Amino acid sequence: MKFEFVKDRQGFTLIEILISLSIFSLLVFAVSTIYIAFNNSQMRTTASQQLLNDSQYAFELMAREIRTSSIVYYLPDQTWCESVLNAVGESNVFTNCIVLEKANGQIVALTSFRSGLSAYLWTELRYVTLNNCVDAYKNCDSWHTNPLAGTILLSPTLNDINIDSLDFHITPTSDPFLSGGPNQQPKVTINMTTSYYDDNKFKNVKHTFQTTVSSRVYKR
């Protein structure tokens, strides 16, 4: 007895293939979009956390130095800061500073320093030790004569962090320990805004910090 098998030669039509490809493409696009969004979110979160950690460390260091030191000058402006820190040119500018005297007599400065030596303009935070300060603390020896005297705390070249703004508001605005001065313990309000320095727009995050610190140094 002879059996005959009938082969089903029916396949997919062109329309079915096109529909399948369209659905597959949509699925791939949806998955890719979710992955890219997740990856961008992860990059932003990582940058934000690094910015927060490093900025908080520097911010707390400034607060501690102010708390345990005496204030040298109560109305520091850019001109005064540059005269103390020996600015070397228009491309390098000390924009804001506070100069302190530690318990051991060492003079230090916390300062924002804007650099224009590259194609991009950035501002960094520096902790500078000063020596041989004469004439109302002007023209001190600083990192310009001894690079080891200046420590960079925050900088795009160090930890990808730029100082957007830094301000030291000192109260009172004159030395309260001088005869006839205001009977008020010095307080410093620190305002600082930092941003992550990167060409990737998804890493463009900022953090703002503010605190008021009272100096614990008492004079008669």
Image (cartoon, helix red, strand yellow):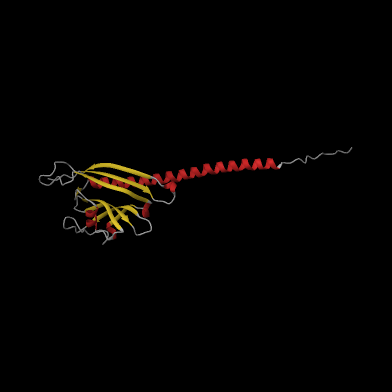
In the depicted structure, whether residue 40 falls above or below residue 148: above
Q: Give the number of marks.
A: 0
Residue at the far bottom: name it: 145
Q: Is residue 194 left or right of residue 106?
A: right
Query: Where on the picture, by quarter, is residue 186?
Result: top left
Where does the N terminus fall, quadrant-wise? top right
Q: Residue at the location (49% across, 43% down)?
A: 37
Could you say where residue 177 lies in the image, as x and y percent from the top left? 13, 46
Q: Is residue 44 left or right of residue 210?
A: right
Could you say where residue 108 lies in the image, as x and y percent from the top left? 23, 53
Q: Is residue 57 left or right of residue 138?
A: right
Q: Residue at the location (37% across, 47% down)?
A: 195
In the depicted structure, whether residue 9 falls above or below residue 112: above
Query: Where on the picture, by quarter, is residue 209?
Result: top left
Tell which of 45 and 167 is nearer to you: 167
Q: Is residue 146 left or right of residue 157?
A: left
Query: Where on the picture, by quarter, is residue 94?
Result: bottom left
